[in-house]
Image (cartoon, grey):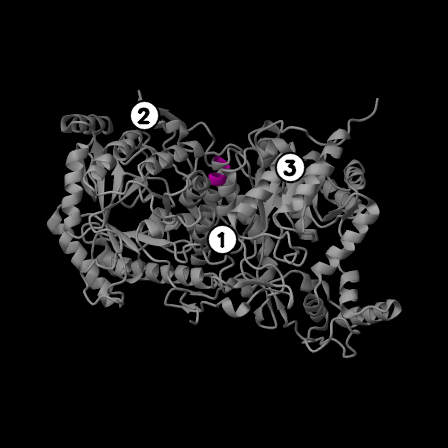
Amino acid sequence: MSSPSASSSSSFPSSPSLLHLAVALDGTGWHPASWREPVARPRELFTAGYWAGLVAEAERGLLDFVTFEDGLAPQSSLPLTPDERTDQVRGRLDAVLTAARIAPLTRHIGLVPTAVVTHTEPFHLSKAIATLDHVSGGRAGLRVRISVRPDEADHFGRRSAPRVDLHRDLAAQPAVTELFDEAADYVEVVRRLWDSWEDDAEIRDVATGRFVDRDKLHYVDFEGRFFRVKGPSITPRPPQGQPLVTALAHRTVPFRLLGRQADLGYVTPHDADQARAIVAEIRAEQEAAGRAGVPLHVFGDLVVFLDETRAAAEDRRARLDDLDGAPYTSDARVFTGTPVELADLLQELQSAGLTGFRLRPAVAGHDLPAVSRLLVPELQRRGAFRRAYEADTLRGLLGLARPANRYATA
Amino acid sequence: MTEPLKQVHLAAHFPGVNNTTVWSDPEAGSHIDFSSFVHFARTAERARFDFLFLAEGLRLREHAGRIYDLDVVGRPDTFTALAALAAVTDRLGLTGTINSTFNEPYEVARQFASLDHLSAGRAAWNVVTSWDAFTGENFRRGGFLPQEERYSRAKEFLATAHELFDSWHGDEIVADPATGTFLRDAKAGAFVHTGQHFDIHGRFDVPRSPQGRPVIFQAGDSEEGREFAAAEADAIFSRHSRLDTGRAFYADVKARLARYGRRPEHLLILPAATFVLADTDAEAEERAREVRRLQVSGATALRHLEFVWNRDLSAYDPEGPLPDIDPDTGEEHLARGRAQTREYRDRLATAREWRELAAAHGWSIRDLVIHTGNRQSFVGSPATVAAAIDEFVQTDASDGFILVPHVTPGGLDEFADTVVPLLQERGVYRTEYEGTTLREHLGLDHPDHPDHVRRTRRVAS
C-alpha cells in the first residue's frame, strides 16, 4: 500500500513507454468462419501439435503471455443457450491441460488458461495452477470466469443457473452479482492455498527424521458465504509464489472483482476516453478494496484483422462475414487495418492508462503471425516493446514482484 | 509345441508420500520439480514400460492433530502433471488417480478426454473412492457421502463418464471449408443421465479421443472392489506381490469376468512391487536391510507403533523396548488421511503378539517395526529379479508389475539398465513399442471394437 494515488501506475518498475502484449487463443480464431481459411488447420484443433505451433509463434514475437479460452459446454452463437449450428467450430480441450502440455515446449512465454469458477472446486484449481507454475518454471496464470449459462449448470446438476434479463446489464443483476462475489471468495481460497506452504517448508532434516517443518504449512481455514475450505494445499508453493490472476471485465461489478483479487484485468474500451474512464473506475474499486497502489495491470482487449493494407484487412473481414452469414460483432473493439495503424492505436490507448493489450486474432493462423512478425517489429522500432525476454517468470515479464507469503512470520 | 510365453507388463509408480520413499538418501531429488518427473518418465519410456502411474491424496495426512511430517509431503495436481509429461514422452502411458467422490463427471470426463487427445491416446484413469469428512473439509460439498455409498457413487460416476466419452462417435468433425460443414451432427455430444447420484444432461464438449475412453484402473481389494473391477476395469492395481496370494487373487478376479461377457485378457492384474538390486543376491539382501532401516527412522517407528497403540508414545526410546502400557482401544484418534490404520482392528492382540516377537528376538521398537513391516517384493541380482518376475507372470500370479522405487527420481534407472534387458533376453518383454496408444501396449481392445461394443450394450441393457 505504498502509493496513495488510486490512478497511479508508478508502482510498475518497467519502463512506462513499453507496453505489454498478450494473445487470446480460441480455436482457429475469433471470427466464427476462421476455420474455413486455408491457414486454419481445423482438423488438427484437437492435437497438441496445433496448440504448440500457435504458442511457439507467440513466443517468437516475445509476447508476455497467451490465454486459452474455455468453458463447460460447447461453443454457441447464442448468449445463454446452446445452438445447433454445424458450420462453426464446436468442441474444445481443457485449457489448463492444454497449457500444461505446451509448458515444456516453451521457455519464456506466460500460459494463462481460462477456468470457470462457478461449477468447480477452488482446491482442485489452486493445485492445478500451482502445478502449471511448477512445470513451466514460473510462467503460469489463470483467467477466472463465472458462468450464468443454464446448459453449463445442467452439465453439473448441482445448482441451477440464475434467471437473468439479457436486455439489462447482466452483472448488475443480483444473482449475477452474487456469482462475482463468489468468484472473489474463490480466488481468495486459491491464493491462500498457494501460500499455504511457505517457501522453505521442506527441510529434509535427517537428524530428526522430519521432511517438512509443519509450522510452515498452514491451514487456510476459509469460511465464507458460499463455501469453506480447510487446506493446506497438497502442492508446495508455486515458483512465482502467486501465479497471475486475471479476469475479463466490462462493467462495475466485474471491475470490483479486479479491484479485490486480480493482478491483471482485460477490458474492452472502444476509444481512449472510455479507456480512461474504465481505468479510473478500476483504480477506485482497487482503493475501495484496500488495494490502492498494488500493481494491477489493465489490458485492453481488441479483435484484430491485420494485413499489409487496410483494404486487404477489410476485404478479408468481409469475406469471412459472408461465409458466416452475418457481420462479426464483439464485446471488444474490432480493429481492421495495418500493423502501423494498430501500433498507433495501441499507443494512443496506452496513453489513456492501459498497461498492455490482449489481442484476439480473428484468424489464428493469419493474425497471430501478423502480430508476432509485423506488429511487434513496428512497436520495437518505436521503442514501445521489448527486444528480448528480460525475465524468467510471467510476473517478472509484467514487472510484478514475487509476493511475500501471507502466512510467513518475518 | 510349447505355448507361447506370456508377456510381462511393467509400469512405474512415481515414489509416493509414504515411508516406502527414502527422502534421506543422498541421491534423493525433488518430489515436486518437474525435472524429477521428466527423469522418471524418460527412464520408464527408455525401458519400454507400459505407463507411468501417479497416486493422489486430497488432504495432507495428520497424526495427533498435526500434519504428518516424517514422510515426503506434497505432490502435483495429477492431470496437470500428466499433461506436461505428455510433452516429454512419446509412447509412455499416463495413468492418473482421480477421486470419484470430490469431483463431477462432466469435468473429469473432459479432463481425461483432453489428456487422451493431448497425449495421442495414452491416458488412463485409476478410479478411487473416498468418503471421509476429513478430506471433505477441502471441498465445497464437505464430507457428504456415507461410506456405504462410495462404491455406488463410483460406479455411477464411471458409467456417466463413459456415457460422456461415448456421446461423440469419432466421425462428427468434417471441417470441410468448401461446404462450410464443420460438424456432421448438430447434436454431437448430446447426453442425458438420470441416476441416484447424478442427474445431468446437455452436450459434452470434447470430441472422441484417440482411445475412445481412457484405460480404467481400479485399486480396491474388497469383495465390492473386485466385482467392480471385473465389471468395469481394464486393469487392477493390486497389492498382492507374493506368489501364493497373488495366484489366489488372480484366479479369483479372472474367474469373475465371464459373467460380464469378458475374457481373461480383458482385465490385467498388476500388483505394486518394490525392489532392491545389487550385483549379487547377498549384496542385495544387505542393501535391502539398509533400505528398510532408512525407511523406518526412530521417529517413524514410534509413529507406526502409535497407529496400533492409539496413544502418544513420543516419550519412548525407539531403540528401547516396547511399551508396557496397553493400547487405547477407544475411538481411533491419532492418524487421519491414511489407509493403513484400518489394518489394526484388534489392538490388544497385535500389541501382545508384537511384545512376544520383540522379546523372543531382542528387538527394539524400531527393530520390531522394521521386521513386521513390508519386505521388498523383489530382492536380488538382476538375474534373480528377472527370473522371479517372469515366474510370477508365467504362473498366473500377475500379468506384470507396477514398480515402486524408493528413491526419486533415479530409483528406476538401475532396473531399466539391468533387469529389463534380461527380461528381453527371456523373450517375455518387448524391445520396442509395437503400438502408439496405451490400449495397444496393454493388449486391450479399442472401445469401438465389435466385441467391446457388444459387451457394453449387454451390460447397459
B279 is within the stretch colored magenta: no
The chain letter under disc 1 is: B
Residue B103 is marked as 1
Q: Which of A304 and B282 is in front in this view?
A: B282
Task: Give, as a single range, the part of the protein colored magenta.
Answer: B113-117
- Per the image, label 1 sits on a secondary structure element best described as loop
**Callout 3: 10 Å neighbours few (<14), some, many (20+)?**
many
Q: Position of residue B275 (x, y in %)?
A: 73, 47
Disc 3/disc 1 C-alpha distance (Å): 29 Å
Q: Nearer the viewer, residue A175 or A128?
A: A128
Q: Name the side, left or right, on which A183 lies relative to B129.
A: left
Q: What residue type is labelled 1?
A: Asn
Question: Which residue occupies the extreme top position in the image?
Answer: B178
Q: Establish if A163 lies above or below B185.
A: below
- Per the image, label 3 sits on a secondary structure element best described as loop
- Residue A26 seen anywhere in this rendered image of the structure: yes
Question: Taken as a whole, is the magenta stretch helix, strand or loop?
Answer: helix
Q: Where is residue B396 in the image (x, y as percent from the top left)?
A: 78, 39
Q: What residue type is labelled 3?
A: Phe
Q: What residue type is labelled 2?
A: Val
Q: Establish if B253 lies above or below A395.
A: above
Write down the quadrant of residue A366 in the picture: top left
B114 is within the stretch colored magenta: yes
Q: Name the side, left or right, on which A310 lies relative to B87.
A: left
Residue A39 is marked as 2
Residue marked by disc 3: B49
Q: Position of residue A63 (x, y in %)?
A: 31, 41
- Per the image, label 2 sits on a secondary structure element best described as loop
Q: Which of B3 and B64 is in front in this view?
A: B64
